[in-house]
Amino acid sequence: MTSWLGSMGQCCPAVLCRKKGVVKELCMGDSHYYRTVTPGSTPHPIRVTPHGKQGANTITTTRKIFVLSLCWHCGHLRYQVKETKMQMFLRVSLLILLLSLAHHVNSGLVGGYREHPLNLLRAREKGQYIEVANKAIKLMNDVKRTDGEGNVINTVPLTLEELISVRTQVVAGVNYDMVLKIQIDGKSEHCHLLVTNMLNTPVRGGVWSVEAQSANDPCAPFAPLEPRLRIQKRSLLGGEHQASAEDKGVKAAAQWSLEHINSMSNSMYRQVLVRVSNVRKQVVNGYRYRFQLTTAPSGCRNNLENKNKGLEECPVTNFAKAQDCEISVIYSLGKYEMETFSCNPSDQKIFLGGDGHDYKPHGILGGDDHDYKPHGILGGDDHDYKNHGERVQHLLGKNLRDFLPHGRPYYGLPPKKMMNQNLVEKGITHMQIGGDDHDYLPHGNNKCTQYEDQFETFKAKHKKMYKLPEDEAYRFKVFCENMEKVKQYQAQERGSAVYGATKFADLTEAEFKKQYLGLKPLSSAHGLAWPSAKIPGGSFPNSWDWRDHNAVTPVKNQGSCGSCWAFSTTGNIEGQWALTNKKLYSLSEQELVDCDKIDEGCNGGLPSQAYEAIMKLGGLETEKDYKYDGHDEKCTFNKTKVVVTLQGAVNISQNETEMAVWLYKNGPISIGINAFAMQFYFGGIAHPWKIFCDPSSLDHGVLIVGYGVEKGEPFWIIKNSWGADWGREGYYYVYRGDGTCGLNTMCTSATVTKQ
């Protein structure tokens, strides 16, 4: 028997909390519908009492089983359940069914909030939401409330007591709508918060923010951000948002900016960073950071020896006059570029305690390492660590070598913990085995030792800056492994190619493929069957280069977006239009990334499919009108700005002689290639063995613009899309004649409209 019982009160999103057989809360919607499911006919009483109305609206039925609620908004209901194991099994089964149906309904609301009933989550899943809650607590603890005189009044940090409810919404990141029970100044308060993690980039971690859902919320005074739009349209590039000064990317940009300011300064003394404020962040082709740096002169000389030193190593001088610098800096493809900066005397003085001075060890009892230094008291020096009596040869600990700092800084790695505390007294814990950088330094027969200087040169040449010392150490390890690969490639090279530390030398193979390749395998699901091209007759010269005949635009840079297929496509169409209509346009790859619904934007595509997409769109805009940013964006195609249109496309012969004839007569050819060894290509004519460069594994889209012979080696001239600072001024020279790396297996060209 199934019965529906009345409606009462307001209720909140579905939350069912259960502990030891007692249902604490059940809520959902404008009205409650309590459904009693009665398997069998033996009567049992059941009582349902709304929260806060003890004894009111009590409903008694003839069978005590359980109550389910299915409604849609907010309120509370308390009731107690006593049931058999079979009844519990039936209840849980029905509940799972209802929740799955509710989820099915909600899943169709793309961009909407999704409920997460905490009592149904696994411990690991719930733990993830608790981590988000703790992240919000940390952000709020960074906000200091002050009285009228500027004194901090909230000295006790907020602490999380309980996660009460959570909903999530996928935006350009994730919104977490949370109700938390928080300890505020010794009192338990319920806070309704919106915690947001914006993931605009590749980098790692995203930007976190937290705000109270109302001005009267107990946590409102601690919300670090002003109310803002919760969903930002990614198509509105140039939209800035506030960011935390604790953001890793902001910290790295601030440090780079400080070093830039010092490099431009004529002062003998180094400026050190006091604070970062008014931070704004923007996604461009990378990141733009705008902030105010407050700096002050220190007692350290402004030289390389003191580079990257902060307040702790270089204290501010007495009566120092601070300066405020307004900075705008761009970080793109591992490099920083200063857009603007201007520095003026600061209105604020460096007050006692105004920076981090009073939080740093400086001579108070136990505040620094004073009590760990040998200074003549019993056991205060190294007497008990020295061998005395019978001499023992070649044993660890025969002197203090492994307890004393030695070596030199190695990319700033943190000290290792001493594993065997019994080796020393408690009082010498700062003098640990590996307590400095010794155990991170290459010593012995470490193969990476030989690449240290090369890595330093690589960083300087390509302006590489890493956010953390641990990141730099990891990149050096990757660099070392790649240089070992370079040795192998060079040894196996059949041509004259030279391999070395290109700007990609600190990327793993997987990172390189994900960020800089992107040609998709042929798919039968999409794409028209283009006809075969007619091969022209007649002779052709020994060498030809369309760059010399106004049919090739300058080398472009796809950035860390797998859009090589789009650059291969536009390069071909640029050449075809120039030869057919005598106008060379630089065409928009971003239009294809955003608007080509056959291909997959930054996740890859195919030129043969891109031609079809362009015909459906109605043509291509110029690069100037639809600028490239290297991200999947909302399509903003404007048909009135189209400058080229297509009639179709053709597949070109795999015979490399016929390819050369067609290219000479008709223009550049779009191709796919296996990008083996391109990551480390410096110059020369590449000719790797097929066993290493599989012709059937095409993963990169490029453009053949010419051919020739050099010292007896026939070659193709291939335009790449990794910038002019890669390869031979942005070009890849590859052996011609034996299908090297599959370059002859996916050759196509568009046919353009003649004006």
Image: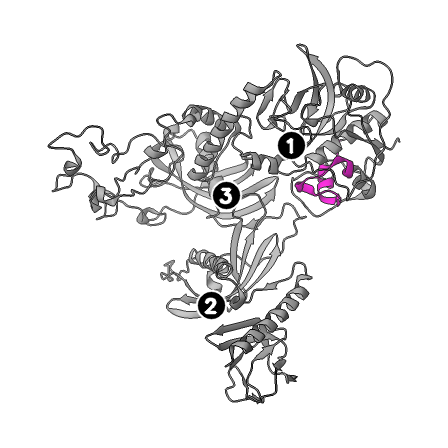
User: Do the numbered discs 2 and 3 sit on residues whose CB atoms are within 8 Å?
Assistant: no
- For the point 57% across and 42% down, the residue is 287
Check disc 3 and report the residue beneath it: 249
Q: Residue furthest top?
A: 711
**Residue 496 visible at all:** yes
Kind of residue at badge 1? Asn
- In the image, what residue type sits under mark 2? Pro
Of helix, strand and loop, which one carries label 3? Answer: helix
In space, the residues marked 2 and 1 are separated at their CA atoms by 50 Å
Q: Secondary structure at mark 1?
A: loop
Q: Comparing marks 2 and 1, which lies closer to the viewer?
A: 1
What number is the disc on residue 218? 2
- Report how far apart the C-alphas of labels 1 and 3 lie in the structure: 23 Å
Relative side of 211 to 597, left or right? left
Q: In the image, which residues are magenta?
A: 586-610
Quarter holding the N terminus is: bottom right
Residue situated in front as seen by the camera: 325 or 416 = 416
* Element at label 2: loop
582 vs 418: above or below:
above
Q: Give the mark nearest the N terminus, 2 or 1.
A: 2
The span from disc 2 to disc 3 (Cα, nearest Å) is 31 Å
Indicate which disc, 2 or 3, sits on the residue closer to the N terminus.
Answer: 2
x, y (%) of residue 578? 81, 26
The residue beneath circle 1 is: 557
Give the quarter of the image for residue 444. top left
